[in-house]
């Protein structure tokens, strides 16, 4: 009789635990919902079979994911004022800042002025910097580089710049041959 009372007492205590919530479900355990509001509109369905009861909660939301428009690279001619400002002030300033910031590393950085946007009409002049240490470059540019944000955009992307393994004299001869239209002739490199 004492053993039976102890067994009933432990069974009663076990019914008010989190384990009971997982085994029987929230629909059959009303003590769990006392004092705790539900997160939104929900439906509770209980499917009963011969020996076990399964329940599930479905939270209904009306939030749809926001899609960002795709940006593309376009080949457009910029206004002469933009090109002049780029070549005289902005490009040399960026080069000096990045040279100082990356003086310990031997990485190569590419700095370009390109047109990026959703369409060709909406594209803006964008300063595109390609390097491998993106965080360091973004930090130094945000601290030291000032530009007109209404005209230009600034994007820093991760990438590797592959340098040509051809020597300077070989490149010069190849360029002369290409410009003259004489690709089939071989000239001796001039030093």
Image (cartoon, helix red, strand yellow):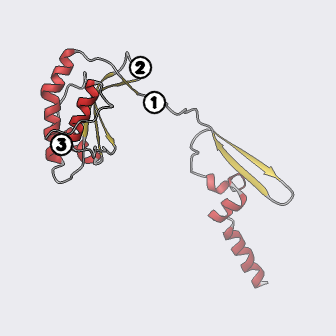
**Disc on the earlier residue, 2 or 1:** 1
Q: Position of residue 81 (x, y in %)?
A: 18, 16
Q: Residues within 10 Å of mark 3 (few under 14, many from 20)?
A: some
Is the residue 38 above or below the residue 94 in the image? Answer: below
Is the residue 42 above or below the residue 71 in the image? Answer: below
Q: Which mark is residue 119?
A: 2
Judged left or right of residue 35, residue 50 is right
Q: Residues within 10 Å of mark 2 (few under 14, many from 20)?
A: some
Label 1 secondary element: loop
Q: CA distance from mark 3 to mark 1?
A: 30 Å
**Disc on the earlier residue, 3 or 2:** 3
Near-viewer residue (52 or 143): 143
Judged left or right of residue 75, residue 81 is left
**Disc on the earlier residue, 3 or 1:** 1
- Give the residue pinned by disc 3: 98
| Quadrant into which the N terminus falls | bottom right
At 75% from the left and 84% from the top, the residue drawn is 2
At 57% from the left and 51% from the top, the residue drawn is 35
At 20% from the left and 53% from the top, the residue drawn is 105
Which one is in front in this view, the residue at disc 2 or the one at disc 1?
2
Q: CA distance from mark 2 to mark 1?
A: 14 Å
Is the residue 143 above or below the residue 113 in the image? Answer: below
At 18% from the left and 48% from the top, the residue drawn is 102
Q: CA distance from mark 3 to mark 2?
A: 31 Å
> Quadrant of the rendered structure where residue 127 is?
top left
Discs 3, 2 touching: Cβ within 8 Å: no
Q: How many marks?
A: 3
Label 2 secondary element: loop
- Give the residue pinned by disc 1: 68
> Quadrant of the rendered structure where residue 169 is?
top left
Discs 2, 1 touching: Cβ within 8 Å: no
């Amino acid at each position: 009789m004492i053993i039976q009372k102890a067994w009933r007492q432990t069974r009663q205590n076990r019914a008010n635990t989190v384990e009971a919530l997982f085994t029987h479900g929230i629909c059959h355990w009303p003590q769990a919902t006392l004092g705790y509001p539900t997160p939104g509109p929900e439906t509770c369905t209980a499917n009963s079979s011969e020996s076990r009861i399964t329940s599930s909660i479905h939270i209904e939301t009306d939030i749809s994911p926001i899609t960002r428009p795709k940006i593309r690279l376009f080949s457009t001619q910029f206004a002469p004022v933009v090109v002049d400002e780029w070549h005289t002030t902005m490009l040399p300033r960026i080069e000096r800042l990045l040279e100082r910031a990356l003086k310990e590393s031997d990485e190569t950085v590419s700095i370009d002025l390109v047109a990026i946007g959703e369409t060709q009409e909406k594209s803006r002049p964008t300063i595109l910097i390609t390097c491998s240490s993106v965080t360091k470059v973004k930090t130094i540019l945000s601290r030291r580089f000032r530009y007109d944000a209404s005209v230009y955009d600034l994007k820093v992307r991760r990438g590797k710049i592959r340098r040509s393994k051809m020597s300077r004299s070989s490149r010069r001869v190849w360029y002369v041959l290409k410009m003259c239209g004489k690709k089939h002739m071989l000239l001796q490199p001039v030093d």
